[in-house]
Image: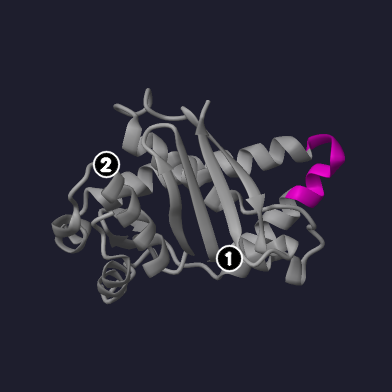
Amino acid sequence: MAIDREKAINDLSQIKVKGNEEGLIPAFGVLVQFLPANFWNTFTEKMLDAAGDKHQASVETGLEQAAAECGYHTGWGIINSDEFNAIVGPMIEKMPEDVLHGAYAVLSAWGWAKCEIIELIPGERKVVRAYEYYESKITETFSIKKPCAYMIKGITRAFMDIAYGGEYPDSFDHFKSEQVKGIELGDSFGEFVVTRK
């Protein structure tokens, strides 16, 4: 890996972002919003509670799918942005693997999740370890007692589609993600295994 992860995170976190009149931040070529993590955790908990046992699996699939769609489009905007190319671009030696590592540096720099790739078999398998992510705090307030990191789970598979797929939408949804560990379950980190479908 050619990416100097710590330097990338430090440099990316120095970028000053400012919201527009709608409260959206047009940085990295995408519109981003900064709502408190508790907002999204409350949203997740209310949806799962309202679904009940009968529809809970469908809601979980929908939450992950929404994260994957968002992760794909936001990720695509980020890796093609001037900011990413200025900071991470000079470190890239191997495509698309170094770009993937750079994308996780962005997630860490912006506080979405402190995470990194710990194993990568190009085009086939990726293991991501997350040491902090907002969904890990869901059990502090709510009654959810199962893996619930739908955001990271969806993003991890979307990033593989970006790296090893073609044009959207044909390149989307070729990978699946499984959360095998979770801070919300008492583990010291979350772990996500992404494999080709």
Point out residue 120 in the picture as x, y percentages from the top left corner: 41, 44
16 vs 153, left or right, is: left
How far apart in space, not on screen, are marks 2 and 1 (Cα)?
Answer: 27 Å
Is 140 situated above or below 119? below
Q: Residues within 10 Å of mark 2 (few under 14, many from 20)?
A: some
86 vs 76, left or right, is: left
User: Residue at image x 39%, y 34%?
Assistant: 161
**Numbered tag placed on residue 134 in the rendering:** 1
Span shown in magenta: 48-55
Which residue is labeled 2 in the image? 96
Q: Is residue 51 magenta?
A: yes
Point out residue 22 in the picture as x, y percentages from the top left corner: 38, 63
Say what amino acid the circle numbered 2 marks. Pro
Is 15 situated above or below 129? below
User: Residue at image x 29%, y 27%?
Assistant: 167
Q: Nearer the viewer, residue 138 or 187?
A: 187
Q: Is residue 53 magenta?
A: yes
User: Residue at image x 36%, y 36%?
Assistant: 122
Secondary structure beneath dot 2 equals loop
